[in-house]
Image: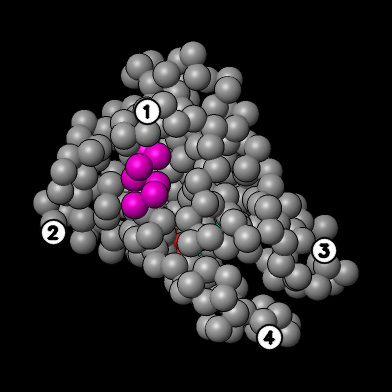
């Protein structure tokens, strides 16, 4: 532990499992008081338990981040318990994998609600407290899918395109209030989401074999690879870094 987030209150949406879980643990070990906002209460409690056993501070607030009332209530509860957030990691998200012509309007609306409306709701709820606290850092999970399309992922790719621009637009509007906003853009990562994506793409005949992933990014990424990049963006180490898209993909998108 080097205390890179000492004194910070960090909200991590989707902080229960996968990259969010790895970030919850890493941010806490770097001194942040961590608030996990996740719909999966039992997994979030497990992650918080691991953090507390290691001597860190973590609280769990159950919410569906696509629901306005639940988000507002969760953020209010975080502020009451830990104080205003000075770090917000908008990580919660999911995926629909289907041939485009089989997708439905309901799936389109649902995925955009979970992946994009969630960022709007969370950021809008957190910003007043963050501004009053003197500033902070927002990190949004985008993806290689914001710039590199995969068959069967039209709905997902468009949500990540929106996240890409959401991060930039927040960055320029709130820079004068000492708020930074950046996107972290993972490649294929070994998480429940990532492994389901690989299995479902394979079932649809898309080659995401170990060899194909190795050719694109050397190996599958680990949740901690992304957590370390998110930590950099969350911490004051990146204090002059604002509005960037930080790809954590070992060169997938560099080719
Ligand atoms: N794994 C990958 O290969 C990969 C690559 C690029 C981007 N991503 C992004 O990472 C995120 C997925 O996270 P992960 O890969 O760490 O996997 P994950 O599935 O383990 O984690 C997602 C977390 O978000 C929570 N969540 C999902 N929907 C929610 C909702 N509506 N309300 C509250 N919580 C919700 C889940 O409970 C879970 O804890 C998504 O934003 C996805 O676009 C993943």
Q: Residues within 10 Å of mark 4 (few under 14, many from 20)?
A: few
| Callout 2 secondary element | helix
How far apart marks 1 and 4 lie (CA) works out to 43 Å
Magenta span covers which residues?
A: 228-234
Pointer 4 residue: 203
Mark found first going from the N terminus, 1 or 4: 4
Assess whether residue 212 is covered by the magenta stretch: no
Mark nearer the N terminus (3 vs 4)? 3
Say left or right for 109 vs 86. Answer: right
Mark toward the start of the polypeptide (2 vs 3): 2
Up-down relation of residue 65 to residue 253 (above or below) = above
Q: Mark 1 points at which residue?
A: 239
Q: Which of marks 1 and 3 is in front?
A: 1
Residue drawn at (62%, 36%) of the image: 166
Q: Position of residue 231 (x, y in %)?
A: 34, 45
- Looking at the image, do the residues carrying marks 1 and 4 touch, with CB atoms under 8 Å apart? no
Q: Residue furthest front?
A: 255
Residues 38 and 55: in front is 55
Instruction: Respond yes or no on whether mark 2 lies under 8 Å from ligand 1.
Output: no
Q: Which mark is residue 53?
A: 2
**Which label sits in the foreground, 3 or 4?**
4
Q: Earlier in the sequence, mark 1 or mark 2?
A: 2
Q: Which residue is drawn at 81% across and 73% down?
A: 99
For label 1, the crowd category at 10 Å Cα-Cα, with few meaning under 14, some 14 to 19 and many 20 or more, is some
The residue at 41%/26% (across/down) is 240
Q: Dot 2, how many residues are within 10 Å of its Cα: few (below 14), some (14-19), or many (20+)?
A: few
């Amino acid at each position: 532990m080097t205390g890179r987030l000492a004194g910070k209150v960090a909200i991590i949406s989707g902080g229960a499992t996968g990259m969010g879980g790895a970030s919850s643990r890493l941010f806490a070990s770097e001194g942040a008081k961590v608030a996990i906002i996740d719909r999966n209460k039992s997994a979030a409690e497990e992650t918080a338990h691991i953090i507390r056993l290691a001597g860190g501070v973590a609280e769990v607030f159950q919410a569906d981040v696509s629901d306005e009332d639940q988000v507002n209530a969760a953020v209010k509860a975080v502020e009451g318990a830990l104080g205003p957030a000075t770090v917000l990691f908008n990580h919660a998200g999911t995926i629909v994998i289907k041939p485009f012509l089989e997708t439905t309007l309901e799936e389109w609306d649902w995925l955009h609600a979970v992946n994009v409306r969630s960022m709007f709701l969370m950021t809008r709820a957190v910003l007043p407290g963050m501004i009053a606290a003197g500033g902070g850092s927002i990190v949004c999970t985008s993806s290689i899918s914001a710039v590199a399309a995969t068959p069967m992922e039209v709905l997902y790719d468009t949500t990540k395109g929106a996240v890409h621009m959401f991060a930039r637009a927040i960055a320029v509007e709130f820079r004068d209030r000492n708020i930074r906003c950046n996107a972290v853009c993972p490649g294929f990562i070994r998480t429940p989401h990532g492994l389901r994506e690989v299995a479902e793409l394979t079932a649809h005949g898309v080659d995401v074999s170990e060899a194909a992933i190795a050719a694109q990014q050397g190996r599958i990424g680990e949740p901690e690879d992304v957590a370390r990049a998110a930590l950099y963006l969350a911490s004051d180490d990146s204090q002059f870094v604002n509005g960037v898209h930080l790809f954590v993909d070992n060169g997938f998108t560099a080719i």
